[in-house]
Amino acid sequence: MALSVSSLASSLSSLSFSSQISRNPNTISIPQPPKTLTISLSSKTTRSLSVAATVAAPVEAEPVENLKKYVKSRLPGGFAAQTIIGTGRRKCAIARVVLQEGTGKFIINYRDAKEYLQGNPLWLQYIKVPLVTLGYEASYNVFVKAHGGGLSGQAQAISLGIARALLKVSADHRSPLKKEGLLTRDSRVVERKKVGLKKARKAPQFSKR
């Protein structure tokens, strides 16, 4: 009996201790941390939403017609009626370029150059090299009509067209542009497929027997 009473007492003490443990979290404000956490999460979500809104805002989806009106207002009579004009070619791409005094705006096929070239830094560098070479990156607006080939070929064709148009601004521009190789038409094209081969030079696997 003594053992049973002592065991009962110990179990009761443990029960009271566990009840105290269970009460202590109740007395401590446990629901407060999730509230603060939810608030912080909501604030983070609102911040992320605001950032997404700011990123989505500069994307010009509708101003294509506005750019068309702008280009037509700046180029009365079309591209052929302008004086500072140059034509560039690369692979199958052809680009007609018109330069006008301005602030360094690039418009390709009635779209912003960064949007048209998909933000590719190499292609954007191609079209800026002739102007940067002469220090005119913020002195001329560039209007381009490009067709054929891919975006890489069009970017290099635009570069040649800008360089040729800059020659009409001043003949003194020839030596710095020629020194950088910007007036040379790159004649490399894809080699044609040959009869009996899979591609231009790739042959089918050879078998002796």
Image (cartoon, rainbow, N blue to C red):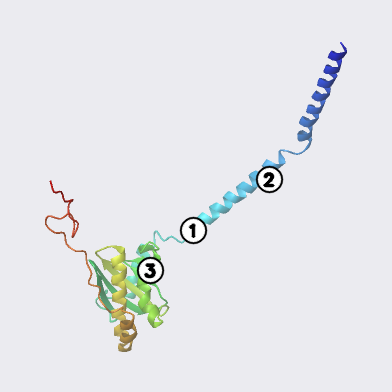
For mark 2, give the secondary structure. helix
Q: Where is residue 35 in the image (x, y as percent from the top left)?
A: 68, 42
User: Mark 2 against mark 3, which lies toward the viewer?
Assistant: 3
Give the amino acid at mark 2: Thr
Q: Mark on residue 55? A: 1
Q: Where is residue 81 in the image (x, y as percent from the top left)?
A: 25, 78
Q: Which of 155 and 67 is in front in this view?
A: 155
Q: Where is residue 78 in the image (x, y as percent from the top left)?
A: 27, 74
In the picture, measured across the screen, residue 8 lies left or right of residue 175, that is: right
In the picture, measured across the screen, residue 18 lies left or right of residue 57, that is: right
- Please identify the quarter of the rendering in which residue 11 is found: top right
User: Mark 3 against mark 1, which lies toward the viewer?
Assistant: 3
Q: Which residue is drawn at 61% across and 47% down?
A: 42
Give the amino acid at mark 3: Leu
- Please identify the quarter of the rendering in which residue 119 is found: bottom left
Q: Residue at x 13, y 59 (%)?
A: 194
Give the amino acid at mark 1: Val
- Please identify the quarter of the rendering in which residue 61 is found: bottom left
Tag 1–tag 2 contact (CB < 8 Å): no
Q: Mark 2 points at which residue?
A: 36
Q: Residue at x 31, y 77 (%)?
A: 162
Q: Which of 52 and 163 is in front in this view?
A: 163
Please report whichever mark, 3 or 1, sits nearer to the chain's N-terminal start.
Answer: 1
Q: Position of residue 72 (x, y in %)?
A: 32, 71
